[in-house]
Image: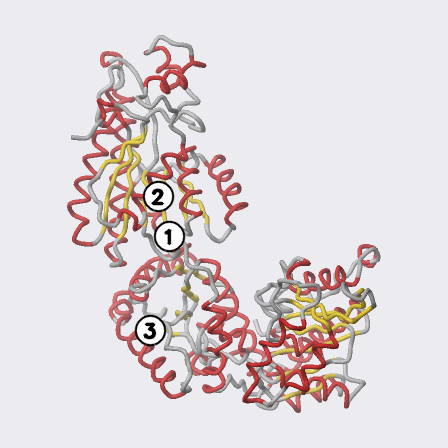
């Protein structure tokens, strides 16, 4: 795999003239932006920006003025909407040149941008605004294509730019984006009017055009030319050839699932982290190569890559030819300590008098020979995106080293970007983390009414959730529904029967592989049965015991083991029943099993306390709405037992309660959230009844 373009097809124009014909200039900018941002070969998530200079009526004078529409701060081109663009008076932006006092005053120019806002647009302008304002073309794209950055990151990038693009692309040496770079782009594009764009050393591509379509197709053409030249001139083999064997898919997944919770525990003492595993072909080629260690040490060249992945990754000491995971695990503490010491030394060497305090010194990217890449961040999406950015960096290193010599961003420049005061201000503006941010929850019986309500509540509070259930169809529907509200990153499913030991271990492994570990277990899988004692079959008895006792034991034991390995504590919540405290005639199998659940929770609470693992119980009663249990035979059995019609069951239980209220799945979810979260950090071994009042169930 030596070709730079790792996609199946070449980058072809997706422009639809018929669709575009009815669009205004701002709509054409949006259309172009979405097309460019939808392909990671063109630009990475959140990276790059686009602009258009549009004639519009001034809202005060009514006269036509030129307005710069440009991607606003923090947006993503692939998903941006029309309100994601900043709008600024172009004449006011040009007037800022008179206020510019030189490179050492770069940052103050950002404070002027809001004063150039057109039509009181609330979308904040980004620091890249001057890179578009001063190029004398109507439409400008700034992209981060792997193929272009590969050329930009070569030691001889200036000469290669001239050779490959034959004078159609200019070249500028690396400098941090800002006002001065905007002036340099203006100067070069003006001095050489035949240029179609400019490569910025180590960073990316600027292209332009007189029309939105022309600009878009010019951008694609330059990327294709870069890809074609790199593929035709790349030396063999990539990354110096293979050094380590690639392990089988199942073996890679098993190793990652074991390492991720251990690493997560070691780097998550101050802040919970979410993990992501990638063993794609590009990653495996790199982590199994001769040049892995030296190239990884160089770090990335493009600041967009670097900001997401830190100055360099950690290469994990693991030999897939002689796999000894115990040896690797025993060396993790020393490896992490060395990385943190190196990062702190980098900070001390490069800091300025006004630099922000040193941030988390743990690595983000972990490269494992023969296995793949792990990434950890504050949330799942950020962890996944970090891995995507490092794949961009891998593609860049492959392309650059294939034709020349790869050059990373210098240490001081890397620091200046990472600890840029403007970046720090952006971080400080980030919203406060939700109460369960960074937490990983496993919900059994996740496809049922209570299970889905619990998942929704935990997701709403920032957790990632793995749902497991025996019902494949219902599980798929639950995942689809939850993903619509909370995104695909935060929710996952695994179909399994919790009464099987191997199946439960597979659930835990899948959760670790998907998210990095486990912090919250909600044992909610359930059935119900009713029959007089003399009519209760052994099969019914054993089925209740198997699911409600053995299943709860197996899942809690596996979760307990994982939480102990992580060493970050944890919370287990059992969804039991009022029947675990109050016997009901005609339901001996069910009541006995629920009583066993409650006592199991107490036993685990005793053993878990020293590990910071809390275990509590929620006791619902008559949660009928949304319940798959109550939809079937159980409802008929309860109606018969109470000598009422099945349609009257919900009202019967409402009137039976002290508060005369029905209990809903959302009520149980609130109780589960309270016990799972730090709101109940000093509670373990407790029972919380959510039954609208039942005196017989008062805990004693």
Q: Residue at x 76, y 69 (%)?
A: 217
Query: Which residue is labeled 3 in the image?
Result: 317
Q: Are marks 2 and 1 in contact (CB under 8 Å)?
A: yes
Tell me the quarter of the image containing the N terminus.
Answer: bottom right
**Pointer 3 local density, CA inside 10 Å: few below 14, some 14–19, many at least 20:** some
**Pointer 1 local density, CA inside 10 Å: few below 14, some 14–19, many at least 20:** many
Regarding mark 1 in the picture, which secondary structure is present there?
loop
Q: Nearer the viewer, residue 167 or 455?
A: 455
Q: Residue at x 35, y 74 (%)?
A: 361
Rendered position, 625 above or below 422: above
Q: Earlier in the sequence, mark 2 or mark 1?
A: 1
Q: Nearer the viewer, residue 218 or 582?
A: 582
In percent of width and height, residue 412 lies at 46, 87
Camera-near label (2 vs 3) is: 2
In percent of width and height, residue 243 lies at 43, 76
In percent of width and height, residue 72 lies at 62, 67
Mark seen at residue 436: 1
Q: Is residue 356 left or right of residue 222?
A: left
Marks 2 and 1, how far apart in space? 9 Å
Q: Nearer the viewer, residue 619 or 393?
A: 619
Marks 3 and 1, how far apart in space? 32 Å
Mark seen at residue 352: none
Residue farthest toward the front in the current orientation of the protein: 60
Query: Which residue is labeled 2 in the image?
Result: 673
Marks 2 and 3, how far apart in space? 39 Å
Rendered position, 235 above or below 305: below
Q: Earlier in the sequence, mark 2 or mark 3?
A: 3
Q: Residue at x 27, y 58 (%)?
A: 568
Q: Is residue 641 left or right of residue 397?
A: left
Regarding mark 3 in the picture, which secondary structure is present there?
loop
Q: Nearer the viewer, residue 27 or 256?
A: 27
């Amino acid at each position: 795999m030596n070709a730079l373009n790792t996609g199946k097809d070449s980058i072809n124009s997706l422009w639809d003239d018929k669709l575009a014909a009815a669009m205004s200039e701002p709509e054409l900018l949006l259309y172009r932006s979405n097309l460019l941002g939808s392909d990671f070969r063109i630009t990475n998530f959140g990276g790059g920006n686009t602009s258009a200079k549009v004639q519009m009526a001034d809202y005060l004078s009514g006269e036509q003025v030129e307005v710069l529409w440009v991607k606003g701060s923090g947006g993503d081109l692939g998903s941006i909407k029309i309100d994601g663009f900043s709008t600024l008076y172009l004449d006011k932006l040009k007037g800022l040149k008179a206020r510019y006092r030189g490179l050492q005053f770069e940052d103050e120019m950002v404070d002027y941008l809001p004063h150039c806002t057109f039509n009181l647009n609330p979308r904040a302008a980004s620091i890249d605004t001057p890179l578009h304002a001063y190029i004398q073309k109507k439409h400008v794209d700034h992209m981060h294509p792997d193929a272009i950055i590969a050329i930009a990151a070569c030691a001889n990038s200036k000469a290669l730019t001239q050779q490959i693009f034959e004078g159609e692309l200019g070249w500028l040496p690396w400098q941090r984006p800002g006002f001065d770079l905007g002036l340099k782009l203006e100067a070069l594009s003006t001095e050489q009017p035949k240029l179609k764009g400019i490569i910025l050393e180590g960073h990316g591509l600027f292209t332009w055009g007189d029309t939105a379509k022309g600009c878009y197709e010019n951008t694609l053409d330059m990327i294709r030319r870069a890809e074609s030249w790199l593929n035709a001139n790349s030396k063999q083999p990539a990354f110096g050839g293979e050094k380590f064997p690639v392990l089988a898919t199942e073996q890679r997944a098993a190793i990652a699932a074991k390492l991720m919770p251990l690493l997560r525990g070691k780097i998550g003492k101050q802040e919970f982290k979410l993990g992501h595993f990638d063993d794609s072909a590009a990653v495996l080629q790199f982590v199994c190569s001769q040049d892995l260690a030296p190239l990884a040490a160089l770090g990335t060249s493009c600041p967009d890559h670097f900001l997401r992945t830190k100055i360099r990754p950690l290469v994990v000491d693991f030999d897939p030819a002689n796999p000894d995971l115990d040896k690797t695990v025993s060396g993790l503490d020393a490896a992490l300590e060395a990385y943190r010491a190196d990062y702190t030394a980098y900070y001390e060497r490069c800091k300025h008098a006004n630099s922000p305090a040193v941030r988390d010194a743990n690595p983000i990217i972990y490269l494992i020979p023969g296995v793949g890449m792990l990434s950890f961040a504050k949330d799942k999406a950020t962890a996944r995106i970090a891995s995507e950015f490092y794949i961009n960096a891998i593609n860049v290193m492959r392309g650059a080293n294939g034709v020349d010599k790869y050059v990373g961003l210098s240490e001081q420049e890397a620091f200046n970007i990472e600890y840029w005061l403007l970046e720090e201000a952006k971080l400080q503006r980030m919203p406060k983390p939700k109460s369960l941010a960074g937490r990983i929850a496993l919900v059994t019986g996740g496809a049922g009414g209570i299970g889905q309500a619990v998942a929704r509540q935990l997701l709403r509070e920032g957790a990632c959730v793995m749902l497991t259930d025996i019902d494949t169809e219902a599980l798929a529907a639950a995942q689809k529904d939850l993903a619509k509200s909370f995104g695909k990153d935060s929710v996952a499913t695994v179909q399994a029967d919790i009464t099987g030991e191997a199946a439960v271990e597979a659930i835990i492994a899948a959760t670790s592989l998907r998210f990095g570990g486990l912090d919250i277990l909600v044992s909610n899988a359930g059935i119900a049965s009713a029959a007089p004692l003399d009519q209760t079959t052994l099969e019914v008895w054993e089925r209740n015991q198997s699911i409600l006792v053995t299943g709860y034991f197996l899942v809690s034991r596996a979760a307990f083991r994982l939480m102990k390995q992580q060493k970050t504590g944890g919370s287990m919540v059992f969804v039991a029943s009022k029947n675990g405290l109050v016997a009901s005639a005609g339901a001996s199998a069910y009541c006995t099993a629920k009583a066993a659940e409650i006592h199991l929770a107490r036993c685990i609470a005793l053993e878990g306390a020293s590990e910071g693992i809390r275990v509590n119980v929620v006791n619902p009663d008559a949660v009928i709405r949304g319940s798959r249990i109550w939809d079937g035979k159980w409802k008929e059995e309860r109606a018969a037992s109470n000598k009422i019609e099945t349609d009257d069951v919900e009202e019967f239980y409402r009137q039976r309660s002290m508060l005369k209220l029905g209990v809903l799945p959302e009520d149980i979810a609130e109780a589960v959230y309270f016990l799972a979260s730090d709101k109940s950090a000093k509670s373990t071994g407790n029972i919380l009844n959510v039954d609208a009042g039942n005196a017989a169930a008062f805990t004693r």
